[in-house]
Structures are given as C-alpha cells and as structure tokens.
Image: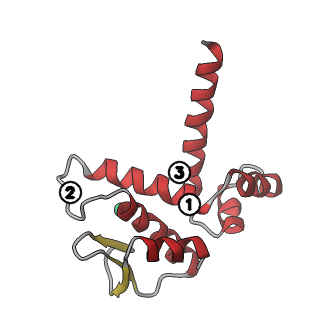
Amino acid sequence: MDREIYRLIDELGIRITEHAGGEQGRWYDKPRVISLRKGLNYIERRCTVAHELGHAALGHMSSPPPWLRPRQEREADAFAADLLVSSETYAAAEDLHGNHHGAIASELYVTRHLVDVWQRRWQCRTDDFRTHERL
Ligand SMILES: [Zn+2]
C-alpha cells in the first residue's frame, strides 16, 4: 500500500486487524483499531483503509448516534478521496479516459465510489470558486 497510508497508520497509532464477513472495514476508537474484511482485493483494501483512517484522523466515534453517522461517513469518504487522488493524477486519468468513471477508477487504483466522491467534492469547490468570483 501507499507510503502515505503506512505513515498515517503509524502516526495515528493504529493497529490493523482482519474480520470475516460483514462490512469491508470497521473503525474502533478504543483501542484504536481498523479491521478489514478478509478477501478484499487490492483496490478495495486501499480505499477501505483510507476511509477508516479518515474516521481515525477526524476523531470519529466508532458507535456514533444515528443522526451523526451519515455525516461521519461523508467526512471519511472525503478524507479517503483527498488522500488517494490528487487533482494532477485525476486530470491525467481524465485525459486518458474522458468522463468514464469506471476507467478512471481503474487508472487511479480506487473504487468507482471514490471517483464519484472525488468528483462531487471537486464540483463543490468549483462552485464555491465561481460564487466568490461573482462577488
Ligand atoms: Zn465509515
């Protein structure tokens, strides 16, 4: 896996373990453990660790109240997208594959879901920029 991911695991003092069946990844805040489902392929594993690292880095609870859960999930997704995809690598993949999310995902070694997340984030930033320009 990426050096940046290993650095974060180390820096955040996280132990990685595995579980069978169920969710692809789990975050436990006490003790700080990320558990990955056995049998994930490289891309799933990479994206799942990045997402769970988001929960860890952002100080998320492993058992949040229901109203908070969707927000924590969005934030962890956004963290993973920013960690794994830079605007330069995304632009290069888009040059090669146009707006084909599946092909961009394979090119960047991320899931399609993460490409969708990344694009939505970029769209928001561009909209913000346009709003500011008009002021
Ligand atoms: Zn999550």
Residue 8, which numbered label?
A: none
Q: Which mark is residue 64?
A: 2
Comparing labels 2 and 1, the label whose residue is closer to the camera? 1
Position of residue 34 in the picture relative to residue 99 (left or right):
left
Q: Is residue 116 above or below residue 37?
A: above
- Side of 65 where 16 appears, left or right: right
Position of the C terminus by quadrant: top right
Quadrant location of the N terminus in the rendered image: bottom right
Q: Name, please, the residue furthest toward the left.
A: 65
First of labels 3, 1 by sequence position: 1
The residue shown at (68%, 68%) is 106
For disc 1, the marked residue is 83
What mark, if any, has residue 117 been given in the picture? 3
Q: Position of residue 46 (x, y in %)?
A: 53, 74
Q: CA distance from mark 3 to mark 1?
A: 12 Å
Name the secondary structure under disc 1: helix
Q: Residues within 10 Å of mark 1 (few under 14, many from 20)?
A: some
- Which dot, 2 or 3, sits closer to the camera? 2
Amino acid found under the numbered disc labelled 1: Leu
